[in-house]
Image: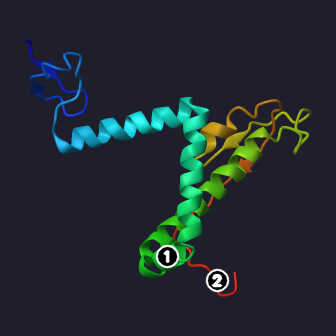
């Protein structure tokens, strides 16, 4: 029987004689990834399976109501990471709203150029219905500390 190449780690392996179409080696990490991929795909494609998974998760959450609070209490670094991620998501959403807002400025009669500056300027480049002189600066708020009471 010919050797096969594992889909995940790339190592050569001998497929099982009972599963000649085997595409993943028997290493624990590769098998875990195979099962997770199958589960994810099954949830995506099978509405009955998706509902069973949701019901199971809800049942577990109902049986362990204080789990989330105790996890957050014992993992403050996760809270901080989530807070920073939320700030980035909020900034991205504000930029996307600005990029879609073609009616905010009536610059059609202006003869000047438009300069868009910032790390998210690529998304704003589509906002080109008018010409004019407009500077949009995105400030870096990731280093700012939250103010007390906010």
Residue sitting at 16 percent across and 39 percent down? 27
Horizontal and vertical percent position of residue 76: 45, 78
Q: Are dots 2 and 1 in contact, CB under 8 Å?
A: no
- Quadrant position of residue 128: top right
Horizontal and vertical percent position of residue 62: 59, 67
Label at residue 147: 2
Q: Is residue 127 in view from this perspective? A: yes
Question: In the rendered image, which quarter contains the N terminus?
Answer: top left
Give the mark nearer the N terminus: 2 vs 1.
1
Disc 2 crowd rating (10 Å Cα; few below 14, some 14-19, many 20+) is few
Find numbered disc 2 in the image and state the secondary structure of the residue it sits on: loop
Find numbered disc 1 in the image and state the secondary structure of the residue it sits on: helix
Total numbered circles: 2
Horizontal and vertical percent position of residue 34: 31, 35
Q: CA distance from mark 2 to mark 1?
A: 21 Å
Query: Closer to the camera, 145 or 77?
Result: 77
In this picture, residue 64 sits left or right of residue 18: right
In this picture, residue 52 sits left or right of residue 41: right
């Amino acid at each position: 029987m010919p050797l096969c190449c594992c889909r995940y780690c790339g190592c050569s392996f001998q497929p099982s004689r009972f599963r000649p179409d085997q595409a993943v080696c028997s290493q624990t990490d590769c098998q875990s990834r195979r099962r997770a991929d199958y589960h994810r795909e099954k949830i995506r494609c099978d509405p009955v399976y998706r509902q069973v998974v949701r019901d199971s998760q809800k049942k577990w959450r109902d049986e362990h109501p204080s789990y989330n609070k105790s996890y957050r209490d014992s993992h403050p670094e996760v809270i901080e990471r989530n807070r920073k991620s939320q700030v980035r998501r909020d900034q991205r959403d504000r930029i996307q709203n600005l990029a879609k807002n073609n009616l905010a400025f009536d610059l059609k009669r202006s003869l000047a150029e438009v300069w868009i500056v910032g790390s998210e300027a690529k998304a704003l480049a589509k906002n080109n219905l008018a010409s004019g002189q407009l500077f949009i600066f995105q400030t870096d708020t990731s280093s700012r500390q939250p103010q007390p009471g906010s």
